[in-house]
Amino acid sequence: MNSLGIYEKALPKHKSWLETLEIAKELGFNFIEFSVDESDERLARLDWTKKQREEVRDASWKTGIRLHTLMLSGHRRFPLGSSDPDIREKSLEMLSKAVDLASDLGIRNIQLAGYDVYYEPKTIQSREWFMEGLKKAVEIAARKEIMLDIETMDDPFINSLNTIAEIKTQIHSPWLQAYPDLGNLTAWPQNDVGRELESNIDNIAAVHLKDTTPVSKTSKGQFRDVPFGKGTVDFEGCLRTLKRLDYNGAYTIEMWSENSADPLEKVKVAKQFFDDIFEKVGIKQEPAVK
């Protein structure tokens, strides 16, 4: 039995946390994936007061909708591999604050964006700084038993589960795992997605459901805002593979509809799309909270 959640950025913006979690409950989801992105607004969450944290935690308890993962995509703006030592220091500070916030909110996983750098040139040194920073980050997270999950990205630096497995041979910790994005995995033509899932199933902590179009000699691919079913991800094949491998973790629908004219309708369509596939391949969903 698997739980199904929705990314926070799919739901209407500017709602209270109680309202947001109630919406997720009404839509039939088990949890929300919490965002700390590169905007000042969401980065400020890392410095929430005790009262602000209580508000979110209490809303979760009241509604029964969990917060499973903190998506720390703010590292794209402040990456671990930056050539600027002040940015590298801030990146680790953000990670430490995110661990404390996750612990306070009952979040078990922090999803790390697998970029060495995003807005800077990539070098051997940027990779080394990333690895050094990641090693420190895992030590910080392990103290509070928070899992760090590296996402397979829209970037060649870490775009496969095999790459994450290689990193794990250098940083040995149960608190460092993988968060495959089925869309990102599929978009890179060198990936054999089925074999990637098979050979790395022991490292998978959670799975993102997102459609994409592929990278090619003439295209950079499209990694977001591709309507489900309009891209090239073989969701039925991927989900059948994960079911056969006895993956019992969470699935999160990743979409960015918070500012659209009717975000709830978009989310309903997406959920029905995956409800139908789950039923077809025999994946049993955790019952929705009553």
Image (cartoon, rainbow, N blue to C red):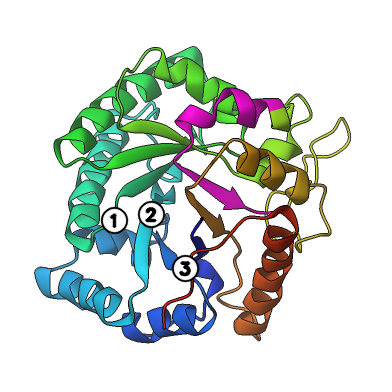
> Is 144 within the magenta?
no
Callout 1 secondary element: loop
Residue position for label 3: 8
Amino acid type, mark 2: Thr
Instruction: Look at the numbered disc 3 and give the secondary structure of its residue.
Output: helix
Relative image position of residue 161 (x, y in whole percent): 57, 28
Span shown in magenta: 195-210
Q: Amino acid at mark 3?
A: Glu
Residue at the spot 35% in from the left edge and 46% down from the top edge: 110
Question: In percent of the image, x 49 and y 34: which residue is there?
Answer: 115
Mark nearest the camera among 3 and 1 is: 1
- What kind of residue is marked 1? Ile
Seen from the viewer's position, the closer of residues 213 and 175 is: 175
Residue receiving disc 1: 107
Image marks 2 and 1: residues in contact by CB distance under 8 Å: yes
SS category of the residue bearing label 2: strand
Q: Which residue is mark 2?
A: 69
Residue 108: x and y in percent read 30, 50
What's the residue at 45%, 68% (across, down)? 30
Nearer to us in this view, 118 or 163: 163
| Picture quadrant of residue 220 | top right
Earlier-in-chain disc, 2 versus 1: 2
